[in-house]
Image (cartoon, rainbow, N blue to C red):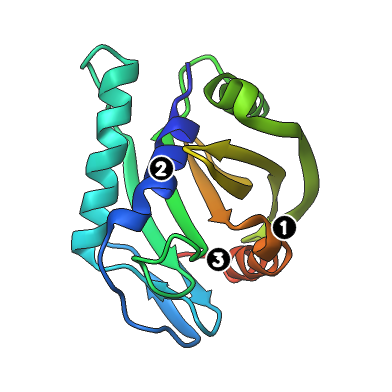
Amino acid sequence: MTRALALAIAAALLLAACGDDDDGGSSSVGSESADYEVELPEGWAEATEEEKERAASLAGAVVDGATGGEGIEGVAVTSLWVGGELNDPETPNIIVIREPVPEGLDFDQFVDISNQNIRTLFADSLAGEIVEADPVDVAGEPAPTFDYEASLGGIDQAKRVMFIDRGDVAYTLTLSSPPEDAKAAAADLDEIAASWEWTD
């Protein structure tokens, strides 16, 4: 069972517990643990390595719980981008998780299973259907993109999930924002994804 979405959802929901981050302008950022770089729109910033490690720790706890403590080899939080103050629960954020595509699955199957995981994870907390959005070209290839809304712990969130195919690994980008900010936040994610460049 693919668990990248469980990781992304858990980390995004728990980011309000993290500390402050600097205001961001448009800048090129990369990742020490992945082979890409992007341009962040004005107002967005890369979280510190400490904050990314905290998100990864929270996500890892979800994986351990889902796998009986066995974990999943090769899963990593590679980026955490924040559209404002990191300690504000109303702040949009994007977490990027890399994971190996399980043997025997093609990328389309990976995406289908991941979306099924969303339905399983949220169950009755999922507001409406998962809706496919127009894909964004990421480094020349269309990235399947989906929108949905969910409520956990009394907090309503709009989500946009984007999947990037990299052969034997996949990158899952999960945007979380207040529903009233969903349109603007989704446009920012699309802009970031459109600037994506592989560096290897």
The disc label shown at residue 136, or none: 1
At which x and y percent is residue 82?
44, 68
Mark 1 vs mark 2: which is more N-terminal? 2
Q: What element carries label 2?
A: strand
Which of the 4 quarters of the picture holds residue 17?
bottom left
At which x and y percent is residue 41?
56, 80
At which x and y percent is residue 55?
29, 49
Residue pictured at 26% horizontal, 34% vertical: 60
Amino acid type shown at disc 1: Val
The disc label shown at residue 98, or none: 2
Q: Is residue 130 visible?
A: yes
Amino acid type shown at disc 3: Trp
Mark pair 1, 2: CA separation = 18 Å
Question: What is the crowding at mark 1: few (fewer than 14 residues within 10 Å), some, or many (at least 20)?
Answer: many
At which x and y percent is residue 171?
49, 45
Q: Is mark 1 on a helix, strand or loop?
A: strand
Q: Are marks 2 and 3 in contact (CB under 8 Å)?
A: no
Position of 89 relative to 63 (above/below): below
- Horizontal relation, residue 189 to residue 152: left or right: right
Position of 56 relative to 139 (above/below): above
Mark pair 1, 3: CA separation = 10 Å
The disc label shown at residue 196, or none: 3
